[in-house]
């Protein structure tokens, strides 16, 4: 990953989830700003309008982080490799991933939905799968299900083969919530079916965290004792590691086509003014979405590894809590998973209990911020969601975002290394990484929580 990518990653974490807008170049005059809103500005406005408590929640953690009372959740680039999976993915990459999957038994899975305006239900848009290894960097793949190739193509068959290997009998899959609830909605893409999902050994880390935390910290002010009460992923990371998992991108346009190879960041119609800045904004938000999607997997893996390690010890660490509520502000208590955006007092039974909230927003005549995707008629699931960018010049009174067909040919990059050379290089990097870990044992104590943690590079779960 480039240094520029990491600079943007740090910028993403450090910025306010509600008020920060990415700086634009000097050509963006006040007049231009009256009719153009960047994707991040649209997202922040959407989140603030329909889920204001999520903005409040994220800002509280952001403030703690800025004050040095908690750290950012971030994973060093040396501890993972990531790949986008879609219609433009090369056969060499898919073959390599199939080889790696054949040697992997532990995975962490998360998903993202594309929000639709009512009465349409959310679309299953992205599957994140982390291959976790004991002695080296993990691999994470991002399957963009709204940009898959036709089912009769060789590329589709390779992607399906990869998924079938991942969902093999005896494999362990970690998720935040029930795996079947997480993955069932993706069966329509025919990459796997419910029988494949039921073959693996699921590990609901959200459920496991509740049991572990309640047993070890029964006097916690954040304790959730009712059967239906659940810890959000963000809260679990904060309580365990004193880190802020930024959830700014939850309502992002996950069907937009995140990988730059899909070229969905390019306007369908030429734009005379500020086209360069608009394209840069679209690329930037896709980078932030990639970071967010990967962190959702990494955080679950880190929690699962920590729970397993701490259960082997006899004395749980002592946790001292920072109060993330302020005077005269409502207490931030979350009773659901990471996408249930409720900030409500204790014992409030009004929260949504689903694993992933289907964002069916209230009927309104002014839901122009919400992306509407109208699939083209097709006999196949694949090939019908030919989405492109949502770039357009808009006014404050008209922020309707349209996703238009984009059928640009995709030129594959020339592979300069053979498949065997690439595989050998990756194996060498894994061995070097393991040797470093073996010689350097990093154990730290979170200053605010006093909760023992392992190094951020230790992401794997032992068999």
Image: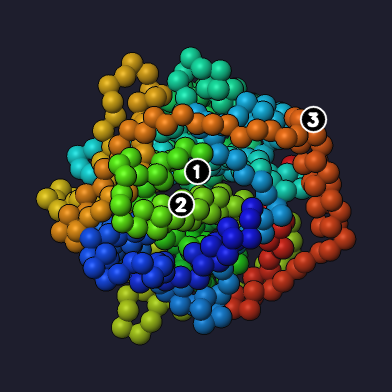
Q: Residue at x 55, y 50 (%)?
A: 294
Depth order, front residue of 380/182: 380
Secondary structure beneath label 2? helix
> Which tag, 2 or 3, sits closer to the chain's start?
2
Q: CA distance from mark 2 to mark 3?
A: 32 Å
Q: Residue at x 71, y 67 (%)?
A: 315
Which residue reaches farthest front?
A: 272
Q: CA distance from mark 2 to mark 1?
A: 7 Å
What x and y, as percent, mark residue 301?
A: 62, 51
Using the image, determine if residue 217 lies above or below residue 204.
Answer: below
Which residue reaches farthest bottom?
A: 327
Depth order, front residue of 289/311: 289
Which residue matches tag 1?
A: 260
Secondary structure beneath label 3? helix
Query: Is residue 289 at least partly visible in the picture?
Result: no
Which residue matches tag 2?
A: 283
Q: Residue at x 59, y 60 (%)?
A: 4
Which residue matches tag 3?
A: 420
Which circle, 1 or 3, is nearer the viewer? 1
Query: Is residue 263 at least partly visible in the picture?
Result: yes
Secondary structure beneath label 1? helix
Which circle, 2 or 3, is nearer the viewer? 2
Depth order, front residue of 314/400: 400
Q: Are marks 2 and 1 in contact (CB under 8 Å)?
A: yes
Image quarter of residue 427 = top right
Using the image, determine if residue 326 lies above or below residue 294.
Answer: below
What x and y, as percent, mark residue 219?
A: 52, 72
Which residue reaches farthest left?
A: 365
């Amino acid at each position: 990953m480039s240094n520029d990518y990491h600079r943007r990653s740090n910028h993403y974490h450090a910025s306010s989830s509600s008020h920060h807008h990415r700086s634009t170049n000097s050509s963006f005059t006040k007049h231009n700003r009256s009719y153009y809103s960047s994707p991040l500005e649209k997202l922040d406005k959407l989140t603030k309008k329909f889920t204001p408590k999520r903005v409040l929640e994220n800002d509280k953690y952001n403030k703690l982080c800025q004050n040095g009372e908690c750290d950012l959740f971030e994973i060093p680039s040396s501890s993972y490799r990531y790949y986008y999976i879609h219609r433009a993915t090369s056969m060499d990459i898919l073959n390599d991933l199939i080889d790696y999957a054949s040697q992997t038994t532990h995975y962490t899975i998360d998903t993202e939905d594309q929000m639709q305006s009512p009465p349409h239900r959310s679309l299953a848009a992205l599957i994140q799968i982390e291959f976790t290894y004991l002695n080296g960097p993990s691999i994470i793949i991002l399957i963009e299900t709204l940009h898959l190739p036709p089912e009769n193509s060789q590329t589709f068959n390779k992607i399906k083969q990869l998924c079938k290997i991942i969902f093999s009998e005896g494999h362990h899959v970690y998720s935040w919530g029930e795996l079947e609830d997480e993955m069932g909605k993706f069966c329509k893409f025919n990459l796997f079916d419910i029988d494949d999902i039921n073959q693996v050994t699921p590990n609901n880390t959200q459920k496991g965290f509740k049991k572990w935390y309640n047993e070890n910290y029964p006097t916690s002010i954040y304790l959730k004792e009712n059967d239906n009460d659940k810890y959000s992923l963000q809260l679990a990371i904060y309580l365990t590691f004193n880190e802020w998992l930024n959830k700014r991108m939850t309502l992002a346009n996950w069907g937009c086509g995140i990988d730059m190879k899909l070229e969905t960041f390019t306007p369908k119609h030429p734009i005379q003014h500020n086209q360069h800045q608009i394209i840069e904004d679209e690329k930037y938000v896709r980078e932030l979405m990639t970071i967010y999607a990967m962190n959702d997997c990494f955080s679950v893996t880190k929690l699962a590894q920590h729970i397993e390690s701490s259960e082997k010890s006899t004395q749980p660490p002592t946790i001292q809590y920072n109060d993330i509520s302020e005077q005269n502000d409502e207490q931030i208590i979350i009773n659901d998973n990471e996408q249930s955006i409720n900030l409500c007092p204790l014992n409030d039974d009004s929260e949504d209990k689903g694993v992933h909230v289907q964002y069916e927003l209230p009927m309104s005549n002014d839901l122009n911020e919400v992306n509407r995707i109208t699939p083209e008629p097709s006999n196949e699931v694949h090939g019908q969601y030919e989405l492109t960018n949502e770039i357009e010049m808009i006014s404050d009174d008209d922020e309707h975002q349209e996703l238009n067909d984009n059928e640009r040919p995709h030129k594959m990059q020339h592979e300069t290394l053979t498949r065997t050379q690439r595989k050998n290089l990756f194996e060498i990097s894994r061995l070097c990484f393991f040797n470093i870990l073996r010689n350097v044992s990093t154990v730290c104590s979170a200053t605010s929580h006093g909760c023992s943690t392992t190094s951020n590079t230790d992401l794997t779960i032992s068999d």
